[in-house]
């Protein structure tokens, strides 16, 4: 009692030692088990539970072998918004002809100028914010565009898992299958497909390597390569792994049109990937997808050219693929896998951006949003210019201007409309190639204003008065 | 008598802990961390990508991990190893770290010093002109240690139509 400390002090000291020892033991044991688990995971990166082949269209079956990737794939059903992209889920009452219980927000309500831009075309009836891969098939099945005009079977090329269908319809020849379904009706093809895009559409079932399964891409990239002096290009044989990490996405995230009465899905890349190359493509020149309801102009529709715009940007030039940002690597224990929850990189700045850019997340996010905001503002200016041209054309037409008088302005409306459509349908708010996007908007704005000038010039000396009044051809002089 | 009894119980437990630590040390190849072999740093899979980048980097033939990531004096070197060892173990075990790992301020300083250790002929002029805190070598020379350049794998876009 006198020599050392009190029994109470002794007890306290003992308790403390026991506590510290316990904590250290837990820590060391946790680390030991952690290292053990990581070593085990690194040993078996994949366990083959079921056999998959080119008949296995159900992603859930592939998912048994690759549960982590499959889980990510399923999560594309989550709906989230960034500053400009994505969409929140709007609740909806299911009806007899449309069982959907959530919808993405209508872009037509947000910006009614789109309705005028597409007047007379089904897109002016229903056009919504984008949402994940999980919804591609049902959203296309039930979109209001189906009611506005029956959609062709060719649309299914990018809205469903098709490998098994191509093979079945083409009796083993996918290109023949492709040709057959293109000119079938949407509802006919719809009955043959079950899943949205799935594992089989991008992966070889034997080796799991990336592969191209869409004939339209094979034909498009072949034409593009031919324009660069490379004959008979086949990405499945010649593309690098890094190129394939973009090409598989480019099977669908591109602009296109349906060529001829056989409605062959065509990527107009025979002159290059820039908007002017596409508009002047041999296949695209005669294209008239609809007649503008207000101006009578023969129009051409652009669709989500993510691949084309990205190819003009700094990330493409630096060798960064779609998957690098949209499907960044992530750790699952000791294994590195690609994120299969494809979404905006703004939701994974650390994994998507910070692997190259040594800046804080906040800084990187604000860089992206500044680029997008600048684009958004310029886009609004360009839209206004197009609206002015359409309004003037409409007024002149109603006042009885001849087709000849309207020709030049219509040509410029066709071009300005396509340029704006190209960049508005594109899903990155200009980010995939900021300078190229601004250039396109500048051209669109100029073409709209030039259209107004051309129209005024054509009508000079022939004042527009009452509708039906005959105007002098050529105008003025 | 009582305290003596308790120590009979505690001693084996303490021994158990020491044994556990010793076993973990060997199992985790703890001894390898005392040396300079770069493969050691890739004992943890997290470091694989950084190791691969170093293999492809220009400094591979002149510098190993320790040359850039630990100070160039014995005490500083082993203190940094010990501190990194503890915090990395803690982070990896708890899982509380981002997929793209980010260097902490202290680690960045070690790297900056390491550049200056070998390249002092060049850097002292810059540091005198710019003030030592104002200049970061790796801000511009980011790829010398770990080459993350993808461009060599992109034949497609280097040949894209220039119109």
Image (tube, grey):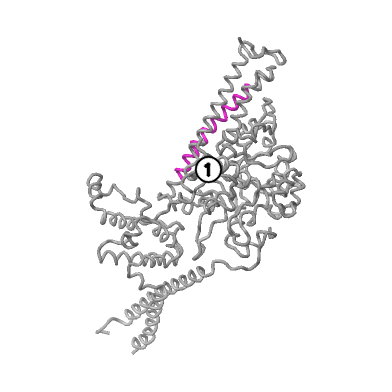
Q: Is residue A431 magenta?
A: no
Q: Is residue A143 above or below residue A74?
A: above
**Magenta part of the chain:** A365-392
- Counting from the top left corner in percent of width and height, residue A181 is at 73, 47
Question: Which quadrant does the C terminus of chain A fall into?
Answer: top right
Q: Is A170 or B7 nearer to us in this picture? A: A170
Q: On the rendered structure, is A369 left or right of A387?
A: left
From the viewer's perspective, tell me whether residue A191 is left or right of residue A461: right
Would you name the residue on which mark 1 appears?
A310
Density class for disc 1 (Cα within 10 Å; few <14, some 14-19, many ≥20) is: many
Instruction: Count the labels in the image.
Output: 1
Does A366 appear in magenta?
Answer: yes
Residue B42 in percent (x, y) is at: 41, 65
Of residues B31 and A115, the one drawn nearer to the viewer in this rendering = B31
Q: Which quadrant of the view contains residue A75? A: bottom right
Vertical arrangement, residue B16 with respect to residue A386, above or below: below
Q: Secondary structure at mark 1?
A: helix
Q: Nearer the viewer, residue A312 or B45?
A: A312
Looking at this view, name the residue that lies furthest to the bottom: B1
Which residue appears at 26% of the width and 62% of the height? B72
Q: Position of residue B128 (x, y in %)?
A: 22, 46
**Image quarter (top left, top right, bottom left or bottom right) of the N terminus of chain A:** bottom left
The chain letter under disc 1 is A
Q: Quadrant of residue B52 in the image?
A: bottom left
In the image, residue A186 above or below residue A462: below
């Amino acid at each position: 009692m006198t020599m050392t400390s009190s029994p109470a002090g002794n007890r306290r000291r003992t308790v403390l030692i026991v506590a510290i020892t316990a904590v250290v033991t837990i820590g060391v044991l946790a680390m030991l088990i952690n290292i053990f688990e990581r070593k085990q995971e690194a040993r078996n990166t994949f366990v083959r539970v079921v056999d998959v082949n080119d008949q296995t269209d159900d992603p859930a079956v592939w998912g048994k072998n690759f549960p982590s990737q499959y889980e990510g794939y399923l999560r594309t059903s989550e709906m989230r918004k960034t500053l400009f992209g994505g969409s929140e889920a709007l609740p909806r009452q299911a009806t007899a002809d449309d069982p959907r219980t959530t919808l993405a927000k209508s872009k037509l309500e947000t910006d009614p100028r789109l309705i005028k831009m597409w007047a007379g075309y089904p897109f002016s009836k229903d056009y919504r914010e984008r949402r994940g891969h999980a919804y591609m098939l049902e959203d296309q099945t039930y979109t209001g565009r189906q009611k506005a005009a029956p959609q062709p079977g060719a649309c299914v090329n990018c809205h469903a898992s098709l490998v098994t269908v191509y093979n079945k319809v083409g009796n083993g020849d996918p290109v023949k299958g492709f040709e057959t379904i293109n000119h079938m009706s949407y509802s006919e093809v719809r009955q043959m497909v079950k899943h949205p895009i799935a594992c089989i559409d991008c992966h070889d079932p034997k080796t799991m390597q990336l592969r191209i399964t869409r004939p339209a891409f094979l034909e498009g990239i072949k034409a593009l390569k031919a324009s660069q002096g490379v004959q008979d290009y086949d990405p499945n044989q010649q593309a690098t792994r890094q190129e394939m990490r973009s090409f598989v996405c480019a099977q669908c995230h591109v602009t296109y049109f349906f060529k001829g009465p056989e409605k062959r899905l065509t990527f107009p890349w025979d002159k290059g990937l820039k908007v002017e190359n596409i508009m002047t493509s041999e296949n695209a020149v005669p294209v008239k997808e609809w007649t503008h309801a207000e101006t009578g102009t023969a129009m051409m529709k652009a669709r989500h050219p993510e691949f084309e715009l990205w190819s003009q940007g700094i990330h493409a030039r630096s060798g960064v693929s779609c998957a690098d940002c949209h499907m960044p690597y992530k750790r699952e224990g000791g294994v590195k896998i690609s994120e299969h929850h494809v979404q905006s990189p703004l939701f994974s700045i650390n994994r998507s951006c910070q692997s190259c850019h040594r800046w804080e997340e906040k800084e990187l996010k604000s860089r992206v949003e500044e680029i997008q905001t600048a684009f958004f503002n310029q886009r609004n200016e360009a839209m206004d210019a197009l609206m002015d041209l359409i309004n003037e054309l409409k007024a002149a037409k109603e006042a009885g201007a001849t087709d000849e008088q309207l020709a030049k302005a219509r040509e410029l409306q066709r071009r300005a409309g396509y340029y704006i459509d190209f960049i508005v349908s594109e899903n990155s708010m200009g980010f995939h190639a900021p300078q190229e996007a601004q250039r396109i908007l500048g051209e669109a704005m100029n073409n709209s204003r030039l259209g107004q000038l051309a129209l005024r010039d054509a009508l000079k000396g022939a004042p527009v008065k009452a509708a039906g009044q005959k105007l002098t051809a050529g105008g003025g002089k | 008598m009582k305290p003596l009894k308790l120590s009979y119980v505690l001693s084996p437990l303490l021994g158990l802990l020491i044994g556990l630590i010793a076993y973990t040390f060997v199992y985790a190849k703890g001894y390898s961390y005392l040396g300079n072999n770069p493969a050691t740093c890739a004992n943890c899979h997290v470091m694989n990508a950084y190791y691969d980048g170093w293999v492809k980097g220009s400094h591979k033939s002149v510098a190993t991990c320790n040359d850039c990531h630990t100070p160039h004096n014995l005490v500083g070197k082993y203190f940094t190893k010990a501190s990194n060892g503890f915090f990395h173990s803690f982070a990896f075990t708890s899982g509380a770290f981002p997929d793209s790992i980010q260097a902490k301020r202290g680690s960045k300083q070690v790297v900056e010093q390491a550049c200056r250790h070998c390249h002092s002929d060049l850097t002292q002029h810059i540091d005198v002109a710019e003030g030592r805190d104002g200049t970061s070598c790796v801000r511009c020379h980011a790829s010398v240690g770990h080459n993350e350049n993808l461009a060599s794998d992109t034949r497609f876009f280097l040949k894209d139509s220039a119109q």
